Amino acid sequence: GSWDVQIAYGTSNTIQIEADDNLLPYIKTEVEKGTLKIDTKKYINLQSHKKITVYVLVTTLTGISLAGSGDIIGKGNFTNNGKTSFSLAGSGNIKIDFKTIETVGISIAGSGNVKLSGVAENVTASIAGSGNASCENVIADDLSASIAGSGHVKCTANKSVKASIMGSGNVYYKGNATNIKKTIIGSGNIVKI
């Protein structure tokens, strides 16, 4: 089944898992090279009558990766003077409200959705499939988007928008960007909203 992961900013890193008692021994959490990984033990497929919910408090957010159909939701004073990556493979959803991130990297493979809000210098989005990067509430200087398929990217860009589209996907932008560059094969386009 799908999992829900709720992330919040904290003064220390903590994790709490809410699931049927008989399933808890099969849920694996580990930190590897500074990355928290939440998964099931090898060769285990959990079937639960209720959703498994994971609550995570983090002091720093440098990336989120979701494979499958779960939801990851986060709010907080997340800041990063480097790059924070949001990677999604499958039909899941990532929704994060952050304070400031220098470079936001979004990668979607499949039909999933990434919805972000906050302030960033750069947003780079790559979509393969029908997924959507809904970042119109991210105020950025520069947006660079690459779409292969029917997915869409939305963002606020105040300096530049660069798009490479192969298919019917569109890049929508708000803001005052004046440097617009596009390479399009198919019916996709860049649209100011």
Image: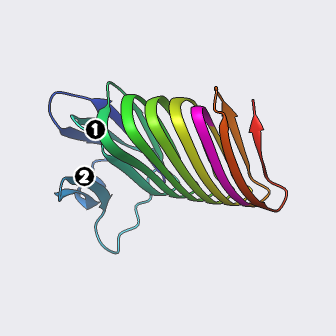
Q: Quadrant of the C terminus?
A: top right
Q: Residue 84 location in percent, x, y?
A: 36, 45
Q: Are marks 2 and 1 in contact (CB under 8 Å)?
A: yes
Tag shown at residue 36: 2
- Could you say which quadrant of the image residue 57 lies in? top left
Query: Which residues are the magenta region?
Result: 155-165
Residue 112 appears left or right of 172: left
Q: Report the residue at 34% width, 35% height from top.
A: 7
- Secondary-structure class at tag 1: strand
Mark before the other along the chain sequence, 2 or 1 = 2
Dot label at residue 70:
none
Horizontal and vertical percent for residue 81?
29, 37
Q: Which mark is residue 56?
A: 1
The residue shown at (30%, 45%) is 62
Q: At 52% from the left edge and 30% from the top edge, which residue is drawn?
A: 138
Instruction: Give the answer, above or below, for where 24 lies relative to 177.
Output: below
What's the amino acid at mark 2? Leu
